[in-house]
Amino acid sequence: MWAFDEKRFSVFSESLRKPLPKDLSDFYEDARERGIPVIEEETMDLLSFLLSLKQPDRVLEIGSAVGFSAAFIIEFLKHDASFTSIEYNDGMADEALENWKRLGILDRIDFRRGDAVLVLKELEEPFDFIFLDSAKGQYPVLLPDIKRLLKKGGILFSDNVSMEGRVTESRFFVERRDRTEHERIRSYLREVSKDPDFLTDLLPLGDGILLAHKLV
């Protein structure tokens, strides 16, 4: 009987992946070589599919880092789509702005520098798509405003919710310094998944993705 080989399937899947445009590919490789966290290729596959299918008019990114994910997302948006990005770390924010300027997309981004907990409260207009990839310990704190800002039919794409697989472990098997983040990300996953206003799916892609479709 044939048995599914996840590793071989992953290698085969990679062979089918469309290459990034050269400027984005160079950006991605440079960030990885410098040890800067960027979205994984499996995450990009799903993200590009959903954005192309949904064609959202208003997108919110929580966690710009050095700006790669924003540059990637904008590749799949209509030119007149609104894109807002939030970043707390000044060093990351400065580099993101430089990268967006170099790529010629700075004028397409409404950039908000600051703590997302506070910045979200300043936003009012609903978004069709929210990409969440910030400090994992903040996810439960951000959720009420995220839900308020996500319109009916909108998609919440929460990245890196697996914590490299540790999210499934008992807190006693997690290093003490990571336990608070571990507890909070598990709390976030439970709260979103059990919320009757969301249809959710937890996917073992990249470092874990929680998709939530807002029903009301």
Image: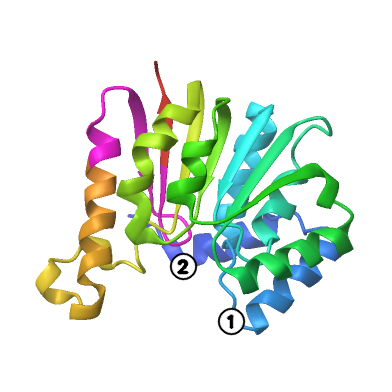
The residue lying at 64 percent from left, 77 percent from top is 32
State which quadrant residue 114 falls in: bottom right
Residue 195 location, x and y as percent? 26, 29
Does the image show residue 175?
A: no
Task: Please determine whether, in this image, residue 172 is positioned above or below residue 24.
Answer: below
Instruction: Count neighbours of disc 2 (C-alpha within 10 A) and say few if under 14, some if 14 to 19, many if 20 or more.
Output: few
Q: Is residue 192 magenta?
A: yes
Report which residue position mark 2 lands on: 7
Residue 152 painted magenta: no
Amino acid type at mark 1: Gly
Q: Quadrant of residue 21?
A: bottom right
Q: Nearer the viewer, residue 194 or 3?
A: 194
The residue wearing badge 1 is 35
Which colour style is shown? Answer: rainbow
Other-residue count near label 1 (Cα within 10 Å), few / some / many at <14 / 14–19 / ≥20? few
Q: Nearer the viewer, residue 179 or 18?
A: 179
Which residues, given as a range, are shown in magenta?
A: 191-210
Quarter containing the C terminus: top left
Taking the view exactly as shown, the residue that stands out farthest to the left is 172
Q: Amino acid at mark 2?
A: Lys
Q: Residue at x 84, y 34 (%)?
A: 79
Q: Work out how far the residue at label 1 is from the one at label 2, CA to CA, in angstroms.
A: 24 Å
Numbered tag placed on residue 13 in the rendering: none
Q: Is residue 147 visible in this depiction of the protein?
A: yes
Q: From the image, which quarter does the N terminus lie in?
A: bottom left
